[in-house]
Image: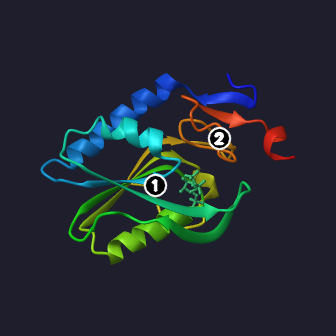
Amino acid sequence: MHKDLERILLTEQQIGERVTAVAREVDKAMTGKRPVAVGILKGSIIFYADFIRCLTVPLELDFMAVSSYGSGSTSSGKLKIKKDLDGDVKGRDVIVIEDIIDSGFTLACLKKLLCERGAASVTIVTLLDKHERRTEDIAPDYNCFEIPDEFVVGYGLDYDEEYRSLPYIGILKRSVYQK
Ligand code: PRP
């Protein structure tokens, strides 16, 4: 285990099994369609790569980078588009792939934006849901794990751009971010 972690919350094996199971459900629901899988950078990259490899429907891949956090550990309440989609989502079935829903602000804004751009459907898939922190009226269509309100890193999630490449998800020691 990484020395900055208090404990491992989700092991590589737990993540792998659950991601595969959820991807199979989404795959079934998308039968006959050709969805666009939209990964929200950067946190979702590892989840995205594992998730899409379990899908059998024909897929188009696209990415967006947005930010709703400042450099600290709480939401700032502002959404900024740092990188927009390459393609047009008009009339398309969109699968939004996120690493975590916290306040729900990011996904609420993204869903509204994709609907305004004429997406035929917007399906939200998240790896983690910190449900107790929700302030927006939004729920994922598919969630892999509901987690407690702890600072989690690994499997794509960072603190100050560190820890993203850990293959598991761990709880960061308070001493690391409360300096
Ligand atoms: C995280 C996460 C979501 C958002 C969730 O991204 O990937 O996009 O915050 O928070 P919310 O529900 O309160 O809006 P972050 O800004 O940390 O960027 P990153 O994915 O590049 O790490």
Left or right: residue 146 versus residue 161 is left
Q: Residues within 10 Å of mark 2 (few under 14, many from 20)?
A: many
Taking the spot 34% from the left edge, 77% from the top edge, the residue there is: 116
Q: Nearer the viewer, residue 32 or 88?
A: 88
The amino acid type, in three-letter code, at marker 1 is Ile
Check residue 40 in the rendering and tell me which mark sits there, or answer none: 1
Q: Can you tell me which quadrant of the image ligand 1 is in?
A: bottom right
Whether label 1 lies within 8 Å of ligand 1 gets the answer yes
Residue occupied by mark 2? 152
- For residue 55, say whether it is visible: yes
Quarter of the picture holding the N terminus:
top right
Residue found 33% across the figure and 63% down from its top: 86
Residue 173, horizontal then vertical, whole percent: 78, 36
Question: Of residues 81 and 106, which is closer to you in this image?
Answer: 81
Q: How many marks?
A: 2
In the image, which is nearer the foreground, mark 2 or mark 1?
A: 1
**Amino acid type, callout 2:** Val
Question: Taking the image as drawn, is residue 137 in sight?
Answer: no
